[in-house]
Image (cartoon, rainbow, N blue to C red):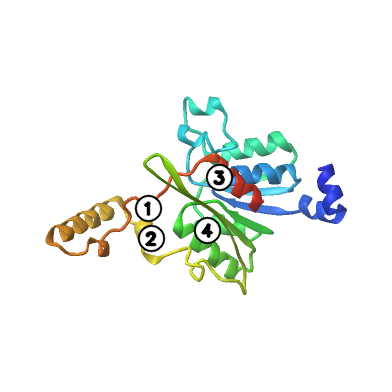
Amino acid sequence: KERLLELMGREAMTRLRHATIGIIGCSGLGSPAVHVLARAGIGRFVLVDKGRFKPSNHERNHASRATDTAGASPWKVDLLRRLVHEIAPHTKVTSIVGDVLDEIVVDELVQCDLVLGGTDSVYARAALGDLALHYILPVIDLAVQMRASEGILKDQVGEIARYAPGLPCPWCRDRVQARDILEETMTDEEKTQRQQAAEAARARGDDGEQYWTSGGRHELTVGYMTTAVAAMGA
């Protein structure tokens, strides 16, 4: 913290110590961002993630240990809370196993000084834009896309977007699409029905995209890229 004090001044350090930062997504992007922010002296975090840690997360989750890859799968928010307290034991942490659309989550987020998005969910990104607009809540949204073909890495894209009243929203920036949100929020039964309808349409020689378009959309990401983007966002 001494270097931050020399660089930013005592007033800024005081503001950091009294700041509350909300984190949506506590793995590849959220965990390295919190890693940086906890060392910077942020006074309180609100951690939100509905998922459990999986061994495949270990490569990019700064909060995980080798021992977390065996046995019961802990909640991601619990791992990140542990990391924060190992760095700064007196930091206040509110961890919620939930979704950005949950009322209890919204109640906590609107009390934050800033929310940082680290989710790969399209509907969550749209929700962050709504929170920024309706509650005058500053949001910094992070994303990473990586594409490979035949064992060769073709593209690496890191995105850092800021949402606030007067700034372009996620829809304006073309970062969310209604069809993507619809497909994300479908039940498994609805997804199966749409996939079958798409296959039947293609068999007839028609365009199956009107029924289902999700094939191959989700791209895998790795830790060096998510860490770099998250650190910049922090």
Q: Earlier in the sequence, mark 4 or mark 2?
A: 4
Q: Earlier in the sequence, mark 3 or mark 2?
A: 2
Q: Earlier in the sequence, mark 1 or mark 4?
A: 4
| Pair 4/3: label in front | 3
**Do the residues under discs 3 and 1 have CB atoms within 8 angstroms?**
no
**Which one is nearer the viewer's eye here, 127 or 61?**
61
- Of label 3 and label 1, which has the lower sequence position? 1
Task: Kindly identify the residue that appears in the image at 52 percent across and 34 percent down.
Answer: 59
Q: Residue 129 lies in what quarter of the image?
A: bottom right
Q: Position of residue 169 (x, y in %)?
A: 54, 69
Q: Earlier in the sequence, mark 4 or mark 3?
A: 4
- Say if residue 116 shows up in the picture: yes
Residue named by callout 4: 103
Numbered disc total: 4
Please identify the quarter of the rendering in which residue 27 is found. top right
Mark 2 highlights which residue?
180
Q: Position of residue 17 (x, y in %)?
A: 78, 50
